[in-house]
Every structure is written in structure tokens, then in C-alpha cells.
Amino acid sequence: MRRRSLPALPVLLIAVAAAMGLSLRNGFVYDDVPIIVHNSRVTDPARWHTILSAPYWPGTLWRPLTIGNFAVQWQAGHGTPWLFHLVSLLGYLALAYLLVSVLKRFGIDPLAALIAGALFVVHPVHVEVVANVVGQSEIWAALAMLGATAVYVHARNEHQEKRWLLSLLVLVSLGIMAKESGFVVPALLAGAEVLLVKDGRPWHRRLRMLIPVVIIALLFFGVRALTLHDVKGELAAVALRDLPLRERALTFLGVVPQYLRLLLWPAHLQAEYGPPGTPVGGPFALRHALGALIVLVVVWLTIATRRRAPVASFGLWWGMVALAPLANVLTASGIVMAERALFLPSIGCAMALAAGLNAIAADRARLGHRHVIPQSLAALLVALMVVGAVRSARRVPTWSTQDRFIADLAVDAPMAYRGWKVAAEIVRSEHRDSVGIADYQRSIALWPHDEAVFEQLGQMYRMAGRCDLAVPVLAQGVAVRADDSSLRAKLVECLMVLHRWDDATRYAQEGVALGQAEFTGEQARIVRARDSTATR
């Protein structure tokens, strides 16, 4: 392998096609359906004016750029999924090319940069993002954030802050509007200022370009909070919702080794993670100690390489900052663990890898070696690319149809209660009630702490006219989450159908005691229904 012998774009195009190209056959699967197919803000141009002022999910998250992109793609392709998947592939290719270009601008050897970019492209952990249309939010956010980093470093090193400030702020804004991970850009740029910018001026002068970035991020945070009527703007994962800080931190430490495994050896992949297969909380165990050790080693490497290999240090910093919102320290996030959570951090890993290869190439170039990358190492890296591309290509069809997704989920994640819950929700929407009931029952058997599973299963029984089966299920749900008024109302209704007046009254009274005012009228309705039945 010779230095600068391979053009980046054709190599990356081949890698994208080999690893992810089969996604062109995929349809709309899992979250694609509610976010795109059943979302009138995407499918109806008359509602496009609401995109900026509406949440991504009902009442939670705000991603207007992503929804706007979906709306344009739907209109351009008349709702055909292949166009969405083509856009995902092109965005992924653009991101890889930008990564290689940025690495070269940071002084990385072109061959080392291309190898890191190609390995990034074929990594199987990215399949969930690229093969499932809603993953575009990750791609657009990553493009904007990487572009903002490149612009910032260039402007600062060339002393052209005023010239590039507007472009920087536009990229930061686009990243935030694509996905909430864009809010970490100020921290990324602060790391770039320390590690990649050469400026001997006092810090109060060095931060002048960073201050507007912080201000624009805070302004968007305020807009997002006003739009969602909530500062956090995200529902906590049920498994994390009631955990105190210590237990949330332990949960994150427990999944850190799994994240590292997915980055280094993603032989096993699954669309859903969670209890009991992925434990939450304590007590402190070996997995927590291993996670803490990994975090400490990464922090140490970031500090140790900051002078001799600043790009490697920045790559590690990027990875930590990108993953930090999912550490669940300040507040509980919406996931316990997910493969898509590694998409943005893996860009930092690619930077660190490129810096390591660059060090090898520089040493060999000084010694006059013909090959800047040892042939044995080059062969290993090519083998990894081939293995990664094959594994990714085999994983892509998981996201081809709802049936294939459900079938693979049952095999890949049999110990994740959410996997069975998701499968039940999908088959329920397709009116396959018997399968849905069985999947809900499996979900409850694995982890009986999510009131939504009880409510959905109880509702299926109610709709089938089987309140006798619904009542014990709904009662279990109320025991899990007593303040869920919707669940309690369904239980009271079924108890009335069964003429269990005393039980209905008791649950209604408990609701009133919890501050659920709607049950005051419900008590009167129970009395009237009982009296009416008695007089017949």
C-alpha cells in the first residue's frame, strides 16, 4: 500500500455500497412508521408550517430539521421508502468523506485518514442508523457537528474568526435542530480549542469565537423548552425513571463494557437493550468496576496524548462528550443502552485510530520505508474492513420489513423486556391480537415494572370483551404506577362492566386521594350505575 495512492471518494463509495447498500431494499420499519408514514407533518404539505413548532414524538423531543427532511423526501418520492434509504446512504457517504477530509486538515496522513474512514463506514454498529430511516437524525447531526468542528479549527488557526463565524453558527444550529445531541457542540469546540488550536493569547481572548456558540446553543435550548413546554423535553426510560443518581450512574458503568464490546467486536447486535438482559441499578458488581476502569483509562489516555498526539486526544474527548448525555448523571435519558448511541462517539474513535496510524506512518516515513503502513498491519486492516462489511451487509436485512425485524428481535434480544413489548405493539397495530397478547405476556414475565405493558395488554383484553382477563392485568399495572390515571380509568371501567362495584369505588377513591380529580365524577357514575342495575 503506497502513500496517497488511493482516492478517498471511490474507496468510501465502494465501502458504503458493500456494507450498507442492501438497505435500498428496506421498507419503513419500527419507528419509521409513526415518525414518517403516520405523521401528517411529513405526508401532508398543508401541515409543513407546524414542523418548527411541534415535537418529534408526541410531547417529547424536538428535531425540526429531521422532520423537514423527511417531508421533502416523502413529497419527492411519493412516499416510496427506497428514496429515503438512498438519502441515508448518500448522507452516510458524505459524513465519511467529511471525516477523512477533516482528518487530513488536522495533519493526518491521507492513507491513515482513509483507512480510519473506511473502517468507520463498514462498522456493523452503524447499521441501525443507516438501515433504518429515522437514523437520518444521527447522520445530519453528525455532519453538522463535524463540519462545525472543522470550521472552528480552521478559523481559529488562520485567525479568520469574523469571516467564518456565521458559517459556524449555522452549522451549530443545524446540528441542534437535527437531534438534541447537537447541544454538546460547545463542549466539543472547547476541546478543539485546547487541543487543536495554536494560539498563545490569554484565554479570555481565545474564547471569543466560542462564546457566540454557547449563546446560540442556549437560545435554541430555550426555544426547545418553550416548544415542548418542558425544560428537559425527553421522557426518561421506564427502567431509569425512578432510580436515584447513584443507581443511574451504576447503570451507565454497567453498560460501558458492552459499549466497548460493540465498538471492538460487534459480532452480536440487537435492536433493543434493557432489563433484565441489561441490568439496571446496583448492587455494585464486577461489570460496574470494569466500566469504571474503562472510563478511567480513556480519561488517562485523553490527558496523556494531548501533547504528542493531539488529534488522538481530541478523538477521545469527542467520544466522551458525545456519550456523556447518556451517562444519566444529571438526569435520566430515554434509553438504558442503544447501538445508535455509539454513532456519534465512533467518529471520535475513528479520529483516535487515524492518529495512531499516522504516528506509525510518520515514523516509517522518517526511516525511509517504502510502505508507510506495515504490510502485515495493512493486511489486518483490510481483513477487518472485509469482515465488517460482511457483518454489516448481513445485519441490514433485519430492518427490511416489520416481520423480519420482529423475528430477529426475538432471536437477538430474548432477555430484553422492551423487545417483546415492541414486537407486541407492532403486531397489535396489524391486528394480530393472539400474537400480541403472547408477546406482552413474555414482556411482563421478564420485567414486570412497566405500567404501559399492563395497560396495553389490559386494553387488548377489554377490546375483546374480556374484562375478566383485563382486570387482574390492569390491577397489576396500577400497583406498579398508582399515579397513572389512564390505566386506573380502564381498570375502573372494567370493574363496572363486571358489576364489581365495591372494587370500582375503592380504586376511584384512591385516585381522588392521589389528586386525580376526574375520579370524583367517576365515583358518582359508579353509584348511578349500581343503582340502575339494582332496580332492573
Image (cartoon, rainbow, N blue to C red):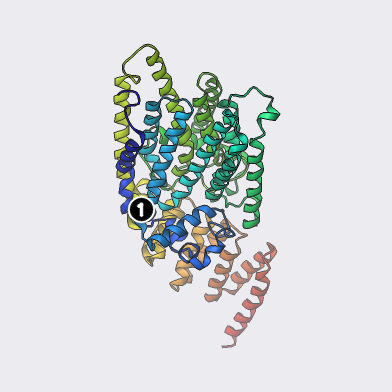
Quadrant of the frame with the N terminus: top left
| Percent position of residue 440, x then y | 43, 58
| Percent position of residue 192, x then y | 57, 30
In-image side of 23 versus 214 (left or right)? left
Q: Residue at x 56, y 63 (%)?
A: 50
In-image side of 28 versus 510 (left or right)? left
Q: Residue at x 70, y 29 (%)?
A: 204
In-image side of 271 versus 233 (left or right)? left
Position of 142 relative to 358 (above/below): below
In the rendered picture of this protein, how many numbered marks are placed on residues?
1
| Location of mark 1 (residue) | 405
| Percent position of residue 144, x then y | 51, 43
Position of 164 relative to 35 (above/below): above
Q: Residue at x 34, y 32 (%)?
A: 7
Q: Residues within 10 Å of mark 1 (few under 14, many from 20)?
A: some
Q: Residue at x 54, y 39 (%)?
A: 148
Q: Secondary structure at mark 1?
A: helix
- Which residue, as the protein is rendered here, is positioned at the far top? 367
Position of 58 relative to 490 (above/below): above
Give the camera-side residue of 459 and 384. Answer: 384
* Quadrant position of residue 429: bottom left
Q: Is residue 243 visible?
A: yes
Q: Is residue 413 visible?
A: no
| Percent position of residue 223, x then y | 64, 53
Q: Amino acid at mark 1?
A: Phe
Quadrant of the frame with the C terminus: bottom right
